[in-house]
Image: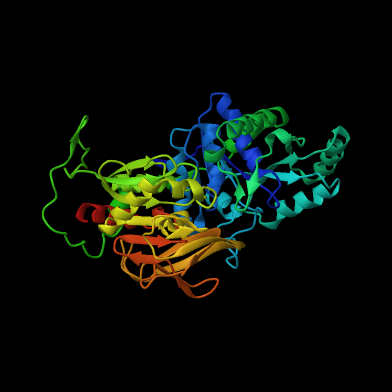
Amino acid sequence: MGSVGSVPRLVVAAPASGSGKTTVATGLMAAWSARGMAVSPHKVGPDYIDPGYHALATGRVGRNLDAYLCGAELVAPLFAHGARGCDIAVVEGVMGLFDGASGEGELASTAQVAKLLRAPVVLVVDASAQARSVAALVHGFVSFDPEVRVGGVILNKVASDRHEAVLREALEATGVPVLGVLRRRAVVETPSRHLGLVPVAERAADAVAAVDAMGAMVAEGCDLAGLVALASSAGPLVGAAWDADEALVSSPPPPLPFPSRGAAPPDPPVGPGGPRPQTPDGLERAVVALAGGAAFSFSYAEHAELLTAAGAEVVTFDPLRDEELPEGTAGLVIGGGFPEVYAAELSANERLRKAVAALAERGAPVAAECAGLLYLCRELDGMPMCGVLDASARMSERLTLGYRDAVAVSDGVLAVAGTRMRGHEFHRTVVEPGAGASPAWGVRVPERRVEGFVEGGVHASYLHTHWASAPGVARRFVERCRTS
């Protein structure tokens, strides 16, 4: 158990989306990392893509801080968990500084997270279409909530030296220092498509080059020493860092143990490395296969950490490349991503599709979110998938996006009926039917409906959840791995 402590930290925010937060935040991470600093990367909200770029810039796992999914009380502990041993932390905001969950006030906004972390904010302003008005804009953001401390401004997309001079002169009246000026450069543009930026896992060398360019541009155009000083002015935080083992200890156990199926389990398999690793209580670790690679790149790091703490040996595999599940797989977790982009390749990997179907058929636990749901369907855009679920999936013109307040409808491998969890949806696909005979979740907003599938050991749904908010989910899943 570590203390939240006083790691220097700052929040990179903006008046609106598209202002350049990702460029500045990733650039700061890369620039400080290049100077030998250990940088802890964080992202406000549920987004999976930006943390991939953060991880590339820092060499550390990008972590999310979401007060809606996890609760405000976990924001500082989860931050401290990621920031252990670091010299500085950078927290990239979401949307505009004060934008959060719809109809919920400041909940899940960048401003709320900045206050929970007692962290100063640096405001990234797109100055491409304004001059003296920038002062009114910054003044409004500084004064809107006195508890949010805007400690500096970085001007983005500045056209010329003359433009910069006008902006700086106007901002003198606000008393907010200009800590950086960036010109627009195509080299740092990152490609987008139907759900935002293209993930790092799909770009490889191009992503590395983009992150390097962001770091160089920020190092050239920003006052790195001044930004370090601003980060060092963050207030002290009191409390303990989040820890997966302790989270499981403090979470309630599964309401009922899963019944044992059949005879006693066989002896642990022995391979070149000897018996599989064991948990501290002497139980063999159950192998949980975690889908990864370009098609399934969306996963919160805490999920694997909780599975490990619950007694699993988490093994990542790539459904685009691997034709078999990891040896000894007892359970399968398939998170989000872009299977629609790789439908042909996923369909062509028939051996793996059959292996997944066989695993589900024998009752092994399978947890699938969004992309995982599509992969388990009978078909995706007309191409055969795993056929675990009697449902078809297709691309849609309609974007489904937003936080969800959900209740488990059916007893399954993740939760018992009545368990309340908060989640997030983000997709341009449709699954027909949208729910099975035993739905996964009942959703209350934006409309009342049921969705997803609970069939045997399968729990498949569009809903992305963060298990740190309910660690018992991981324990229940691993327990099922041992008894199925």
Residue in the picture at 28% in, 57% down: 476
Considering depth in this image, is 235 or 41 the residue closer to the camera?
A: 41
Residue lying at the far top in this picture: please name it: 35
Residue in the picture at 48% in, 35% down: 60
Looking at the image, residue 320 sits to the left or right of residue 396; the answer is left
Residue in the picture at 46% in, 63% down: 422
- Residue 283: % across, % down: 18, 45
- Residue 413: % across, % down: 30, 60
Considering depth in this image, is 203 or 212 the residue closer to the camera?
A: 203
Residue lying at the far bottom in this picture: please name it: 448
Q: Is residue 26 above or below residue 453?
A: above
- Residue 483: % across, % down: 20, 55
- Residue 149: % across, % down: 64, 48
Considering depth in this image, is 282 or 190 the residue closer to the camera?
A: 190
Q: Does the image show residue 445?
A: yes
Q: Does the image show residue 122?
A: no
